[in-house]
Amino acid sequence: MMRSFSAGRCGHLTLCVVLFTLLFLSACGKGGGSSSSSGQTGGSQTTPSAPTVTPAPTVTMSASASNVVAGGSVSLTVLASNATQVVISDNCDTLTYTLSGIGGTQPITPSTPGSCTYTATASGATETATANATIVVKVPATGPPTYSLQSINHIIFMFQENHTFDSYFGQMNPYRASLGLSTDVDDLTNPSFALNPNPSYNAGAQGPPIAPFKMKSACIEDLTPSWNESHTDRNLNAPSSTTATPMNGFAYEAGAYATNNSLVDVTGKRAMGYYDQSVVNYYYFMAVQFAIGDRFFSPVMAKSEPNYLYALAATSQGWIEVPTAQVSAPTIFNLLQNAGISWKIYYTDADPSTGKPDTYAGYFSKLTPYISTNVVPLAQYYTDLQNGTLPAVAFIDSGRESGTDEHPSTNVQTGAQKTEQIINALMQSTSWSSSAFILSWDESGGYYDHVPPAATVNPDGIPPNIAGNPTDKSTFNDNFTWTGVRLPNLIISPFTKKGYVSHTPMDSTAILKLIETRFGLPNLTLRDAAQPNMATEFFDFANAPNMTPPVPPVQLTNAPCYYNTLP
């Protein structure tokens, strides 16, 4: 019970005042504030919240070329973060371009001669960031234009599947002769090595020999280009030989494969078949309009996967079969990314089991961060051609799921028709005048070819991983020091020497060397470093013979497709 006090009970006024004051303070709490259950004084306490910090924007910008003739095309690649938009301006033509907050690729056509500085301004919530790129714009020459390797701003490369040079271009000389051209191609009609008929397969023994023959069906049963079989293709009786390469095991291995897989052609005859201009007419036309090489090899005597590893990274890091883990080797795309040079991988098909892109990029751990940004559907290729946003380097993954990759068991004319669409779209675009398109095949597929693989260099000191697959019998004295079998190829560009045939040995990693040379990049391994310069081999920059693109014939689709008989 709270005791009360009154003035009438106080003997002294001063004492009463003091007592009332104490009573008041006791009831209200010390310091005159409101009381609290914790006994704290001075009223309730509120902790101020920390201020929100907005990250500052960042931006980088690079140009696909450091100089250009006025009116020429250059691409600016902008990478930004923490921005709402990026605006590109310049001090020459006083134009502006607006990109999204993450940047993008902006094609430009400078028209004012001089040293032009392009500034990318990334705007954030409260701050901005800038990056510059300088391009020297030259006065157009009064005479014929002057070109060089730097005139190529876009390199596109693509591999179809599983064919040899002889299986597609084995009749190139008669076709060239019909057009009044030289007949110096090393093909089945003008071989530099003996055309050895291959022993057939006869229930595990060698049967009657089979010579090369013209195929009528656009479809055949599958064959095998795996490590063991490819080395036996080279020398049936002594696959480890480093000197004797009679190229006599193709039919035998094809027959053994058919027998073991319950196929029809158990003699292996299909391996000796070839096509000519009556079936792959588009390729024959392009071969004489542009250029080919009759010493262009796959990188390794093995199946698709190791050859694709070489084609993108100049090594398989020892793999000779399908890798069971990602490889750690950097690819050509990592070099481009580090240098700020634009690139994309266009994939034709999605994996039916996952819906994800069907791309060999998935074999590389260093490409994993870019799968969602730089690996895009093939439809984007056509959009980029239409919008003038083709990257500096592009790789096209072929249609393995849709049957347009020309792999044995698919229709070769259907595949050639797909390739025709891809190449023709480039020739009909504004990007044509500054592009190079290189088409080849990933490996031999088990088809016959009369030219032996070429000696080469091990890329990185890593030996073949024989232990990785229990069916691999031996290294066959091949420490990645032999190429694979010859491949068909087409070097297509405004600058390609018309009708040219190169006899210089190279493998698919020469494409990597071309990209490295054009964009000032280091070599990936000793293998790509050892390749010849494709620019000096195939291009005529003084005359640009194909600046006006040709009008190719429509790829035929009239060949029959059957598997139960030959030819």
Image (cartoon, grey):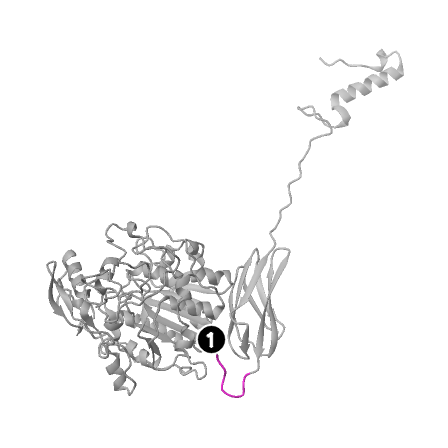
Residue shown at 74% from the left, 29% from the top: 42
Magenta residue check for 494: no
Q: Is residue 178 left or right of residue 374?
A: left
Question: In terms of secondary structure, where does tag 1 sit?
Answer: helix
Q: Position of residue 223 (x, y in %)?
A: 21, 62
Residue receiving disc 1: 149
Q: Position of residue 550 (x, y in %)?
A: 36, 82
Residue shown at 23% from the left, 58% from the top: 228
Magenta residue check for 141: yes
Q: Is residue 213 left or right of residue 500?
A: left
Front residue of this view, candidates 241 and 474: 241
Magenta residues (range): 140-147
Front residue of this view, candidates 356 and 492: 492
Quadrant in the rendering for residue 307: bottom left
Circle 1 residues within 10 Å: few <14, some 14–19, many ≥20: some
Q: Is residue 56 left or right of residue 370?
A: right
Q: Is residue 391 visible?
A: no
Residue shown at 46% from the left, 59% from the top: 334
Q: Position of residue 71 (x, y in %)?
A: 53, 79
In the image, farthest residue toward the front: 243
Front residue of this view, candidates 410 and 240: 240
Q: Position of residue 27 (x, y in %)?
A: 74, 21
